[in-house]
C-alpha cells in the first residue's frame, strides 16, 4: 500500500525544518512520498523543501498566494456579512483551498487510497508513519 504524506507550507521555515528532520527519521519513510504545497515565495521554506534528501518529495509551488483572489473582495464581503465573517472567509479560505488542492493531488495524481495530512509545525514521532499505516490497514479491513 502506498500512503503519501501531504503538507501545506507558507511562511514558518523554523518550524518546518524541525518537522522535515523528524520525518526523515521516521520508520518506513522510504516507502512513501512527501507532497508539499508551498503557498507564497518564502526562500527559507523553499530551501528547506529542496534540501530534503532522505525521502522522495513532490514540491507543488505557488509563488503567488494560491487563492489571494479573495482579498480584493474584502469590502464587498464586509458589506454583505459581519466583519468577523468576512475576515474569517478571507483568512481561512486560502488555507482550506490549498489543503484541498494538495489532498486532491495525492488521490487523483498519485492514485493513493489514503493520505496522511501533517501540519508544518507538528513534529512527528519516529513511529508516526507505522502508526498511520497500521491504522489504515485496520480501518480498510473492517466491514
Image: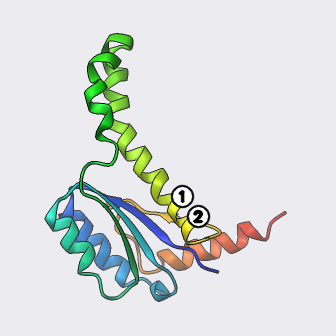
For the residues labelled 1 and 2, the Cα–Cα distance comes to: 6 Å
Q: Judge whether 62 appears above or below 66 on screen.
A: below
Q: Judge whether 22 appears above or below 69 on screen.
A: below
In the image, taking residue 110 as reference, residue 11 lies left or right, namely left
Q: Secondary structure at mark 1?
A: helix
Determine which residue is flagged by label 1. Answer: 104
Residue 115 in the image: state x and y as whole percent: 55, 66
Q: Looking at the image, which residue is at 39% across and 85% down?
A: 55
Residue 56 in the image: state x and y as whole percent: 40, 83
Instruction: Specify few, some or many for label 2: CA neighbours under 10 Å numbering under 14, 14-19, or 20 or more.
Output: few
Q: Looking at the image, which residue is at 42% across and 80% down?
A: 126
Residue 8 in the image: state x and y as whole percent: 36, 59
Determine which residue is flagged by label 2. Answer: 108
In the image, taking residue 15 as reference, residue 139 lies left or right, namely right
Mark 2 and mark 1 in contact (Cβ < 8 Å)? yes
Q: Exactly how many numbered labels are in the figure? A: 2
Quick one: 72 or 39, which is closer to the camera?
72
- Quadrant in which the C terminus appears: bottom right
Q: Looking at the image, which residue is at 61% across and 71% down?
A: 111
Amino acid at each position: 500500500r502506498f500512503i503519501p504524506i501531504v503538507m501545506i507550507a507558507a511562511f514558518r521555515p523554523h518550524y518546518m525544518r524541525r518537522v522535515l528532520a523528524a520525518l526523515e527519521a521516521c520508520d518506513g519513510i522510504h516507502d512513501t512520498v512527501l507532497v508539499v504545497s508551498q503557498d507564497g515565495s518564502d526562500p527559507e521554506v523553499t530551501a528547506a523543501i529542496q534540501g530534503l534528501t532522505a525521502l522522495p518529495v513532490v514540491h507543488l509551488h505557488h509563488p503567488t498566494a494560491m487563492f489571494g483572489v479573495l482579498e480584493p473582495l474584502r469590502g464587498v464581503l464586509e458589506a454583505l456579512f459581519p466583519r468577523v465573517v468576512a475576515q474569517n472567509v478571507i483568512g481561512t479560505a486560502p488555507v482550506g483551498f490549498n489543503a484541498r488542492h494538495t489532498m486532491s493531488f495525492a488521490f487523483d495524481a498519485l492514485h493513493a487510497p489514503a493520505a496522511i495530512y501533517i501540519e508544518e509545525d507538528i513534529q512527528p514521532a519516529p513511529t508516526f508513519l507505522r502508526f498511520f499505516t497500521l491504522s489504515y490497514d485496520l480501518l480498510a479491513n473492517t466491514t
